[in-house]
Image (cartoon, helix red, strand yellow):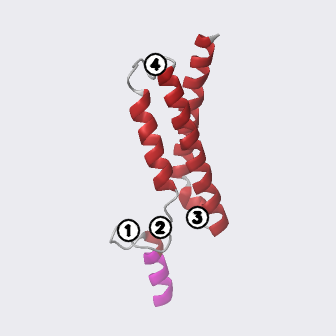
Amino acid sequence: MALGVVGILETASVSFCGVATLLWMSIGTFARSERGEVAAQRAIATLCITSAIMLILLNSMGGELWGSGSMALPMALVAVIVAISATLNLKGKDVQGETNPHEIMKMRREEE
């Protein structure tokens, strides 16, 4: 029975991380509305925290992640860091220090 739980934890934690990654990559689409952005941020944070908890449980039960017994805890830490960074609201702030494509299109429209 414990072996089945370990397998479920491994699969679920990796799946949650994968879904969070897909949401992270799609944040630009969700950011078109304030409500969508907040919902995506909360979903990413929830998935990452849940995944981190599962990875900690996986490690404590002696499970392996990708064939390594010592990989679960560092990945749990990464999941927590991603959860924290997902909740940062950077909308409207120039993070990169460069003009983004949306600003370029906006400036072209204003010129015409």
What type is the residue that disc 2 sits on?
A: Leu
Q: Residue at x 61, y 21 (%)?
A: 8
Do the numbered discs 1 and 3 sit on residues whose CB atoms are within 8 Å?
A: no
Magenta stretch: dominant secondary structure: helix
Pointer 1 and pointer 2: residues touching (CB < 8 Å)?
yes
Q: Which residue is mark 2?
A: 90
Is residue 104 shown in magenta? yes
Residue type at mark 1 is Val
Q: Residues within 10 Å of mark 3 (few under 14, many from 20)?
A: some
For disc 3, the marked residue is: 31
Separation of marks 1 and 2 at Cα, in angstroms: 8 Å
Residue to which mark 1 is pinned: 95
Q: Could you tell whether 95 is left or right of 84 in the image?
A: left
Specify the label residue 64 is tagged with: 4
Label 1: how many Cα within 10 Å (few below 14, some 14–19, many 20+): few
* Disc 3 residue type (three-letter): Ala
Measure the alpha-carbon separation of dots 3 and 4.
36 Å
Give the extent of the magenta segment: 103-112
Q: Is residue 30 above or below residue 3?
A: below
